[in-house]
Image: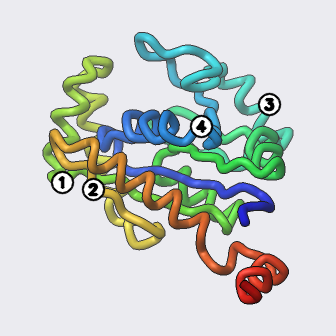
Amino acid sequence: MKGGPGLLFVVSGPSGAGKDTLVDAVRARMPRLRYSVSATTRDPRSGEVDGEHYFFLTKEEFERRRDAGDFLEWRVYNDRLYGTPRDYVERTLAEGYDVVMKPEVNGALAVQAAYPAAVLIFLVPDRFSYLRDRLLTRRTETNEEIARRLEIAHEEMKYIRKFDYIVVNEQHRAEEAVEDLEAVLHAERFRIHRYGDEQLRKVERT
């Protein structure tokens, strides 16, 4: 019965909640799920590949694309610019594929404003203190940068009620969080309102 445009899933939450790990795991389980790569003006971390993890742009190039309307949404996070390329998302959804993205919280809310049909999922650790532990484990930022991310995280937690779902990524139980996230993606596809009258009539006649 599946058909029609794809669904847009927005997985967000504070830095260190495990968005990268969980989204990568779910993508491996769901081959038809497409990933929307964000653009950013921050420098690449060790091992990050341009066009795969982010589109790494200069501030000037980002602002040129922003002014041309190339982003579905854009925002400032920790003094860096982030944005969601519009063309890929709209084209992939129109082709019937589901799309997942993982912006920061303010970016997720901006996506919702631009695309109200988006499904927003808030990812959190079971203890806030684990955020700091995970950020330290990365070894990609200074103590000052980590402190700033934690300040932002405290503010981001206030927006949980604006999301559709919450997934708790418990320490040392990431597999359960992956299963929960996958369950949300599957369940959304089977909501009654996503089926047309003709499709439902076929079911009613069986």
The residue pinned by badge 3 equals: 64
Please tell me how crowded label 3 is: few (under 14), some (14-19), or many (20+) other residues with Cα within 10 Å. Answer: few
Where residue 22 sits: x, y (%)? Answer: 39, 40
Which amino acid type is marked by label 4?
Answer: Pro
* Residue at screen point 19% across, 37% down: 132
**In which quadrant of the rendered image does the N terminus lie?**
bottom right
Specify the farthest residue to the front: 206
Q: Earlier in the sequence, mark 1 or mark 4?
A: 4
> Against 189, is 132 above or below?
above
Residue 30, quarter of picture:
top right
Q: Which of 200 and 23 is in front in this view?
A: 200
Q: Give the CA separation, mark 3 to mark 4.
A: 34 Å
Instruction: Say if mark 1 contacts mark 2, CB within 8 Å.
Output: yes
Which is more foreground, mark 3 or mark 4?
A: 4
Q: Earlier in the sequence, mark 4 or mark 2?
A: 4
Which amino acid type is marked by label 3?
Answer: Arg
Residue 137 is labelled as: none
By what rule are the colours in the image chosen?
rainbow
Residue 87, quarter of picture:
top right
Q: Give the CA separation, mark 3 to mark 2.
A: 38 Å
The residue pinned by badge 1 equals: 126
Q: Give the CA separation, mark 1 to mark 4.
A: 29 Å
